[in-house]
Image (cartoon, rainbow, N blue to C red):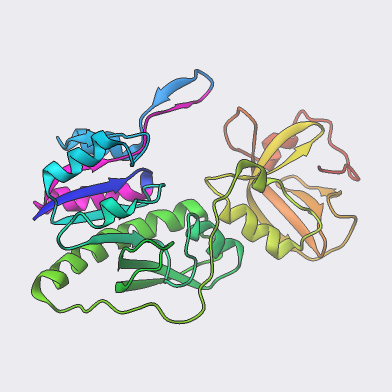
Amino acid sequence: MSIIFFGTPNFAVPILKTLACSGEDISLVVTQPDKVRGRGHKLSPPPIKVTALAAGLRVAQPANLREESILKELITIKPELIIVVAYGKILPKAILELPRLGCINVHASLLPDYRGAAPIAWAIIRGEEKTGVTTMLMDEGLDTGALLLTRETNITEQDTGTSLGVRLSEMGATLLADTLKALRNGSVVPRPQTGKATYAPPLRKEDGLIDWSKNAVELSRFVRGTQPWPGAYCSINDERVTLLRASPVAGKGQPGAVIRIEKYALVVATGHDLLSVTTLQPSGKKPMSAEAFIHGRQLREGLILR
């Protein structure tokens, strides 16, 4: 079965590796173009490109999926199946209709919940107790296709977007293998999505700015959910800082005000209760404990974080 794989970030890596190791015929891996990253402004390949090349797979990085050259290449392959995992762009109708067996998407939510680009982050931010992975047959809508298989997992109070993403990615790799097996032996029947849909829009860098008027429980989820992107950040004495670990504690005060400076925590007032910050990362530096951050900085109680 000739397969074309579309994917870009780390989330897609275990799924591609599982496909490759299982002996599937992956004719081409399509990923996004290299991007300039870091202070050195060097071109950096997406994780899927690195994985694909290491596995000896052919890679294409079109800037536009409607380019005649990429469409001709895909048509020449005559794929029986296209698999899409967090590619980052919408596939045009011409590509969706190309494979004989259709296009399968591995999506990091229990559809129709959290359709869209950032389901992992929003599930944590909005306080969901569970989430999961879904395989579906793609159509022209935004994650509206017929469902194939699903698998659930609980969201713990320690989960970040990073840790939950790793777990869902590994689940997705197994679920896709089960889906392909079920399609081949005819044991799965695509079923339409039912129930009210919710959405997970993309997160922009500016969406990470902390709103201290929100309550401490909401902000603790926001800190966890926005990792690794865009990060929950604020300004402390004009220094931009990203919060990495923070938990709600009882208390009150002006939202954004430093209420206590403890040995192991910076305690800040919110719209309701306090947020105890224990790990953070100043811009351009490595993550550090609150104790290390406080040391050497002229912080005082009553300081307002912006």
Residue 179 is drawn in which quadrant?
bottom left
Q: Is residue 259 above or below residue 52?
A: below
Q: Position of residue 263 (x, y in %)?
A: 74, 44
40 magenta-colored = no
145 or 54: nearer the viewer: 145
142 with respect to 24 (left or right): right
Q: Is residue 269 above or below residue 33?
A: below
Pick the quarter of the image with the C terminus.
Answer: top right
230 or 194: nearer the viewer: 194
Residue 34 is drawn in which quadrant?
top left
21 with respect to 211 (left or right): left
Pick the quarter of the image with the N terminus.
Answer: bottom left
Q: Which residues are magenta?
A: 11-38
Q: Looking at the image, which residue is at 41% across and 64% down?
A: 143
170 or 7: nearer the viewer: 7
294 or 117: nearer the viewer: 117
Q: Position of residue 217 (x, y in %)?
A: 70, 65
Q: Is residue 111 above or below residue 36?
A: below
Q: Position of residue 268 (x, y in %)?
A: 80, 52
**Of all residues shown, which one is farthest toward the top?**
40
12 magenta-colored = yes
24 with respect to 65 (left or right): left
Q: Position of residue 118 (x, y in %)?
A: 50, 55
